[in-house]
Image (cartoon, rainbow, N blue to C red):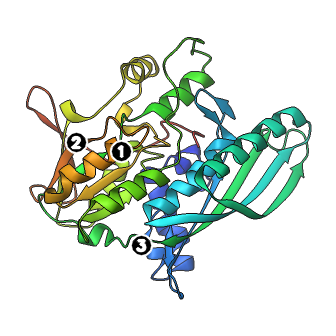
Amino acid sequence: MEDRITLDYGSGGLKTSQLIDSILIPAFQNPILSELGDGAVLDGNNKLVFSTDSFVVSPWRFPGGDIGKLCVCGTVNDLCMAGGIPKYLSLSFILEEGFLFSDLKQIVSSIKKETQKVGVTIVTGDTKVVESGKGDGIYINTSGIGFQHLSLPGKSGIRPNDSVLVSGSVGCHGAAIMMARAGLLQEESPLVSDCQSLHLFLDAIQNAAAPGSIRILRDPTRGGIATTLNEFIEGTSLSIELSSDNIPIDSSVEAACDILGLDPLYCACEGRMLVICDPESTDSILSAMRMVPGGENSTQIGTVTDDLPGKVLLRTSIGGKRILSKLSGIQLPRIC
């Protein structure tokens, strides 16, 4: 590792994993943390799910949302991916001197709207202000607590022939943020972030799936679906094979990625869910996901195999295959 932190270490890819594995895990090692899930499941009279996240997205206002909506969706989604029903949030601001009150009020309004939509309550918080030039307008941290309603075995429960599902088109958030940051988005552009809370998806699949048929859930944020799927099978004897023809990618995302030189499979989502499930439950889970607003394009994109342990393979439209590794380097800084 280098002597100093670089932007690569916030990418969600290989460098982020190196930082976590070499510094954070050794310092705070415990069985709950070592699972490295989106949220931690805690024992009690009822199992609790706990998660925390910080938001530094730039620009703070983007097509399809803003940092206020994002900070609620991000933490709510992490709780849902651990099988939790979100109940409580903390909300902490770091504001830069000179930030407009009108902008803060807009952000708070977005937070209020999304918490009411999801049914979560903000119960604690904090606000700090730093000198002009020592921040970048606004940063937000939210932590969330929920009660576990769906028990998931995690990566240890994944089996050969399991199905890999996604709840909609991928890469929308990362592409929208980068185009907005570059000043390349026209007002009439169809490209918007997919930012949304996934609580309704959790309800839907829980009711549709047979007990034990859902192995693992994850929202593919930094590093996109390629990095997240690599995390599923790291250190296992399994591989994942995807079909490029089955991965839903909006034409506006493809066009943006062509302009920016990005791969949509590594672009962040903020309102999509990856599911690995028993093949016998695939159809019922997909039917349930398609009934949820925003999930109309849910589909199976791949299958778990044991052909090339620890690797994610992409089968192209002409029949070739290539390995999708974890994101290496900084493709999309500050997208969440």
**Residue 87, image x and y in percent?**
61, 65
Answer above or below: position of 83 versus 270: below
* Residue at the spot of label 2: 301
Pick the front one: 37 or 49: 49
**Residue 332, image x and y in percent?**
51, 36
**How many labels were placed on the picture?**
3
Q: Is residue 243 left or right of residue 136?
A: left
Residue 35's disc is 3
Check contact, mark 2 vs mark 3: CB within 8 A: no
Q: Is residue 203 left or right of residue 79?
A: left
Q: Residue furthest bottom?
A: 45
Q: Is residue 167 left or right of residue 97?
A: left
Pick the front one: 204 or 36: 204
- Dot 1 lies on which element? helix
**Residue 319, image x and y in percent?**
8, 31
Earlier-in-chain disc, 1 versus 2: 1
Quarter-of-image position of residue 313: top left
* Residue at the spot of label 1: 225
Residue depicted at x 22% and y 44%: 300
Check contact, mark 3 vs mark 1: CB within 8 A: no
Earlier-in-chain disc, 2 versus 3: 3
The three-letter amino acid code for the residue at tag 2 is Ile
The three-letter amino acid code for the residue at tag 1 is Ile
Q: Bin the neighbour count of mark 1 within 10 Å (Cα to Cα): few under 14, some 14-19, many 20 and up.
A: many
Earlier-in-chain disc, 3 versus 1: 3
Check contact, mark 1 vs mark 2: CB within 8 A: yes
The three-letter amino acid code for the residue at tag 3 is Glu
